Image: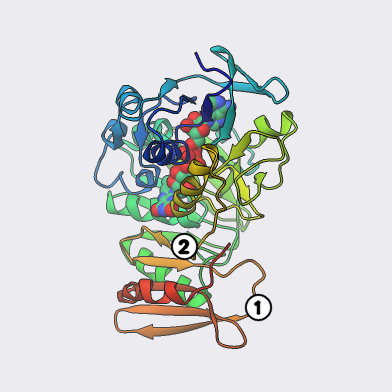
Amino acid sequence: TPSSSTIVIIGSGLAGYTLIREIRKLDKAAPITLITREPGYFYSKPMLSTALASKKEASQLITTASEGMASQLGIDILAQTDVNAIDTAAQELQTSAGLISYGKLVLALGADQIRITLEGSAVSEVITVNDLEDYEKFRKAIAGKKKVAILGAGLIGCEFANDLVLGGYEVDVIDLAPQVLGRLLPEPAARALQDKLSEAGVRWHFSTTVQTVNRNGDALEMKLANGQSISCDVALSAVGLRPRLDLAKSAGVKTGVGIQVNRHLETSSSNIYSLGDCAEVDGLVLPYVMPIMQAARALAPTLLGQVTALSYPAMPVMVKTPALPTVVSPPAKGADGQWKTTTVEGGIEARFEAPDGKLLGFALMGAATSQRATLTKELPPLL
Ligand code: FAD
C-alpha cells in the first residue's frame, strides 16, 4: 500500500514510463506506484499511425506487458484503475480502487483527440485513434473495407493517410486549412508532400470541413461545407489534441492550454508535478516524444530531492510519411521572420530565417532530411 512517502504517477504512456525509468537510474528503491486506466502495458504510440500497412495487430505493438514492467522497474501498478479526484490537502487520490495517498504526485495524463461538431446519424461511428485499444477497433473497422475518409491533414492525419494507401485503401482527406501540416510547413513544401501522397492515391479536400455524416446501408455519406459529398466505409478523425485537464482543474491545480508547470515541472499545488502531452511547460505544449524524454530526465532528480531545471533544445519532429520523408522544426509561435524554400537534388530545404538571417526553424524533405543534424545545431533552444 502506498504511503505518504510514495511517488505516485498517474498514466502509463511514454511520459509515465520514461519518468519511472529515469528515476530507477538514480534510485533503485524509492517506492513508486503507477495508476493507469490502461492495462499497464508499454507500447510505442507513434507506431499507431504506421502499423496498419504492415497489418500489425494491437498485441504486436506491445513491447512489455504490465507484469513485466512492474517487475523490471520494481514498482506497483494499479492497472485499469481510474483516478477520479485529487485531495491536495490530504495528499490523497480517489480512485476506482479506493483511496491512495501520495508523497509526490505526477500527472502524466496525456491528451484527448479533439472532436469537431458534426451532424447526422453516424456521428458516433467516426473513429479516433489515440491508444492501442482505439487502434484495434480501427483495424477491425477497416478489415475487408476499401475507402477511408480522414478528417484532418495534420501530422497524424497525413501519417494515417500514407499508411492506409500503402495498405491498399482509397483515402480522402478533408481539412479546413488550404494545405497539409498547416502550422508546420511553408506552402511549397506542403505542396510537395501533397503531390507525393496524391501520386500514392490520396485525394485532398482543402479549405473545407465535414458537416454531416450519415449511414447509408454499408456506406458512410459525408457532406462537406463546399457542397461536395464523399462516400466511405470508415471515417477517422485526426484534427488535433487537447490536454487532459479535468482532474487537475477540479482539484484547483492551475491549467491553461495544458496543466501549467514551471521549469521544475511543478504545478501550482505543492507536491504535484506534470509532464507529457497534458503539460504546459513554461507556456509550451509540445505533444511529442523528445520533449517527454527531456522532461523525464529533469523531473526524476527533482522528485528525489535534487531540484533540476528543464531545458529544451531544438527538437525536430519526423513526419512518418514514406511517400516523402519529412522533418520539421517549426519556429516559435509569432517568431519574426520568413520561410525560404529551395529545391535540392531529390528533396526540399525550407529555412525559416529571422530578419538578420538567423535560422529559427526548418522543414526538410526527401534527400534534404540528411541536413537535419547540421541545421538543428544552428537553431536556438526552445527553453
Ligand atoms: P499518453 O500516452 O496518452 O498516456 C496518458 C496515460 O494517462 C494513459 O495511460 C491513460 O490511460 C492515463 N490516464 C489519463 N487520465 C487518467 C485518469 N483519470 N486515471 C487513470 N489514468 C489516466 N510524437 C513524436 O515525437 N513522433 C512521432 O512520430 C509521433 N507519432 C504519433 C502518432 C500518433 C498516431 C499519435 C497519437 C501520437 C504521436 N506522437 C508522436 C505523439 C507521442 O506519441 C505522444 O507525445 C506521447 O506518446 C504522449 O505520451 P503521454 O504519456 O504524455 O500520454
Q: At 72% across and 34% down in the image, what residue appears?
A: 249
Q: Which residue is mark 2?
A: 315
Task: From this view, report whether residue 91 is shown above or below residue 352.
Answer: above
Q: Is residue 125 visible?
A: no
Give the quarter of the figure containing the C terminus: bottom right
Dividing the picture into quarters, in which one does residue 68 lie? top left
Q: Which residue is mark 1?
A: 336
- Nearest the eye: 101 or 83: 101
Residue 72 bears which disc, if any? none
**Badge 2 density bin: few <14, some 14–19, many ≥20, Cα 10 Å:** some
Query: Which numbered disc flags the more N-terminal residue, 2 or 1?
Result: 2
- Nearest the eye: 180 or 292: 292
Left or right for 154, reference 18: right
| Label 2 – label 1 distance at C-alpha | 19 Å
The residue most toward the top is 98
Q: Secondary structure at mark 1?
A: loop
Q: Which amino acid type is shown beneath numbered disc 2?
A: Met
The residue most toward the bottom is 356
Q: Which amino acid type is shown beneath numbered disc 1?
A: Asp
Tag 2–tag 1 contact (CB < 8 Å): no
Point out residue 115 in the picture as x, y percentages from the top left corner: 60, 41
Q: At 31% across and 44% down in the image, what residue appears?
A: 52
- Nearest the eye: 339 or 295: 295
Colour treatment of the image: rainbow
Task: From this view, report whether residue 356 is shown above or below residue 363.
Answer: below
Point out residue 317 in the picture as x, y percentages from the top left corner: 43, 61
Q: At 32% across and 53% down in the image, what residue appears?
A: 165
